[in-house]
Amino acid sequence: MNKNFYRLLLMVMCSLLIILIQSQVKAQGLQWATDGYHYYRTVDGEIAELDIRDAAKKNVIVSRAALTPAGKSAIPVRRFVFSDDRQKVLINTNTKRVWRQDTRGDYWVYDVKAKTFTQLGKGRPESSLMFAKISPDGTKAAYVSEHNVYVEDLSTGAIKALSTDGTKRLINGTFDWAYEEEFDCRDGFRWSPDSRNIAYWQIDATKIRNYLMLNTTDSAYSFNVPVEYPVAGTDPSSCKIKVVNVTDGKTMVVNVPGDAVQHYIPRMEWAGNGNELILQQLNRAQNASKLFICNISSNASRVVYQETDKAWIDAKDSPIGWEWIEKGKKFIWLSEKDGWRHAYSIDRFGQEKLLTKGNYDVVSINLIDETNGFIYFIASPDNAAQRYLYRVKLSGGAAQRVSPASQPGTHRYDIAPNGLVAIHSFNNSYTPYATETISLPAHQPLDGKPSTINPDASAAKNKPEFFTVTTADGVNMDGWMMKPTNFDPAKKYPIVFYVYGEPASQTAADVYGAGRNFEYAGDMAADGYIYVSMDNRGSPVPKGREWRKSIYRNIGIVNVRDQAMAAKELFKKNAFIDTSRVAVWGWSGGGSSTLNLMFQYPEIYKTGIAVAAVGNQLSYDNIYQERYMGVPTNEEGRSYFIKGSPITYAKNLRGNLLYVHGTGDDNVHYSNAEQLINELVKYNKQFQLMSYPNRTHGISEGAGTSQHLRSLYTKYLKEHCPPGGR
């Protein structure tokens, strides 16, 4: 349930709103020019160049008229990208969704000098092109269509198939369901810097069994909707890297040592030249990582860096790009091997240097500003609920905070390539999303005026309270609490816990929307509920490796106990909590946590609402579940999955349970609901079920669906955990 930027992020309701708002600039296609002051974006359906120093300046590069083919309406721009020489603009339109994102569509090329507008892939099926890219020399474009890689000459329009063996299950240049879902892999090919070759992934999913979803409503007769889905304990798809010469079509399989089935290659790029590739290989258990440099002339591969972990090792953050410095002599790499997530420089022979020394985590790298000698990154050494910009010298040393101390909360930056200016966005639990353009490193508004971002906690009303609670096990957990409007400490109020609990999401972040339940039809605080969320061990917060990885082989145990013990501590310290009215809810992994809390700690939680939960961990996909629980190849391995699964404890249900699932969920399959139902029926445990026909994991498709779910959720909560102080 590794699901950044999808409707799935309902499982992190408190942060969904701000994540979506913060992504607006990117969704509109902002791209920096090389000088770092100008940038490109769509404005009123046209592609324009703007100047970050002067909002009034606008130079239209591709007008609406230029986007209008003869006899047709103007093409709506979904995405665009410039060629390296800025003489051509590649435009994506008419897009269709592939699993999570709209990565299929049509592509057009606008020639800035010749002022021509030409569609790519003529003769290919409509909306079938994926990930089109113009070659570095600007003469060709490559793309994927129906699982094959094609190259097209931009001057003649001649199209050549570079692979011809692609089928529904033999996938060239893109990925299968599991790679996309769990490694964020979608774009599966790369132009070489000299424009001579294309390196691409080939995923062989022919041996992956289908999960057959059943559609019973869209025709008179039901029919199957198959999804290739490798459940935990079954082999992954075979993964190979191939390189094809775009002139003669000669193809080679890159020599990557090891079993192509029992490994993953989640990241691959050209290694700064046209003759070498660099890639990350993870073993099946994902606890050993090797970085290979592969020479395509000799087809020799050598390991330049490797590490192991008793738990797991994450794939490189960004699925596209590699952070080279010193003209390709070294690259920047993040590792948790010293107990914290730190940045290292590594040369092409494996010599490494720690750059960010200290007891803190690098959350993400924003920019490597080699000209000025700094790495900009996000971290929060003192408050795991917040995010700030820091920088450190490329030679290493003490980190310097760049974000102002007067702005406590969550910061995000889109930094220009020159490292001198940035688009800065800020929010916290009582300050709505705000944005400004700033200089760096001074962090001053470019217009010379005082910053318009002035968070004022004293002026905020009905904001959540952040707290830290120490459990009986000595675990310090951060959380927030939204108290009822007109709160009276002499009264007792019902409490609702929002949980996720697994390594994919943080819920207790200091973001705008914290303390608000977007699944509740109304205002929980006004109705008289206490609303709480806490981050247990295993949640992806910057508290060090041990915090995050203590959940290994213990999903459904450690995280669930942390939540329950923290709830008990809150009850002890807050007499205004009515322990007879305690509810818990969550979505996806949070739904699983909800079920486990209801079943394992029925004395605490009286009402639960679980949505799209994994009831049996052995039914979830291998990449995610094996990463955190180990590979279940024997009885001992399977025992961890069984021990953490809600169906193991369903017989203990004592309270009120509403279970919700979409029958068309390709992520957490509906079989999880039916396995859970069987256990509850077996032990005569009464509960309420809501199945949404053909809805996917987000349960959003179809007229009225979202409103219906909110109404159902709210009605059930009010009936079984009545609101208001007593």
Image (spheres, helix red, strand yellow):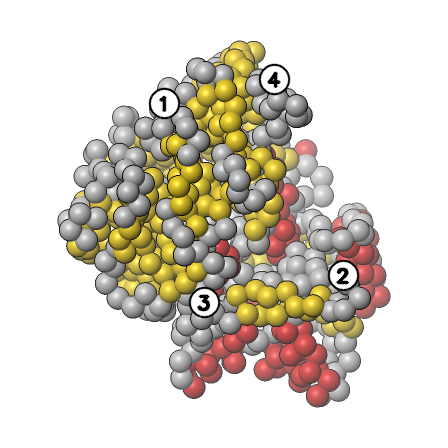
**What quarter of the picture does the C terminus occupy?**
bottom right
Real-space Cα distance between discs 3 and 4?
A: 46 Å
Q: Amino acid at mark 3?
A: Thr
The reply to whether callout 1 and callout 3 are in contact (CB within 8 Å) is: no
Circle 1 residue: 85
Residue 425 visible here: no
Q: Few, some or many C-alpha atoms within 10 Å of disc 1 (few <14, some 14-19, many ≥20)?
A: few
The reply to whether callout 2 and callout 3 are in contact (CB within 8 Å) is: no
Q: Amino acid at mark 4?
A: Ala
For marks 4 and 1, the one nearer the N-term is: 4
Decide: is 142 above or below 81. Answer: below
Quarter where residue 507 is shown? bottom right
Q: Amino acid at mark 1?
A: Asp
The reply to whether callout 2 and callout 1 are in contact (CB within 8 Å) is: no
Circle 2 residue: 218
Circle 4 residue: 65
Q: Nearer the viewer, mark 4 or mark 1?
A: 4
| Residue under the point 58% across and 70% down | 211
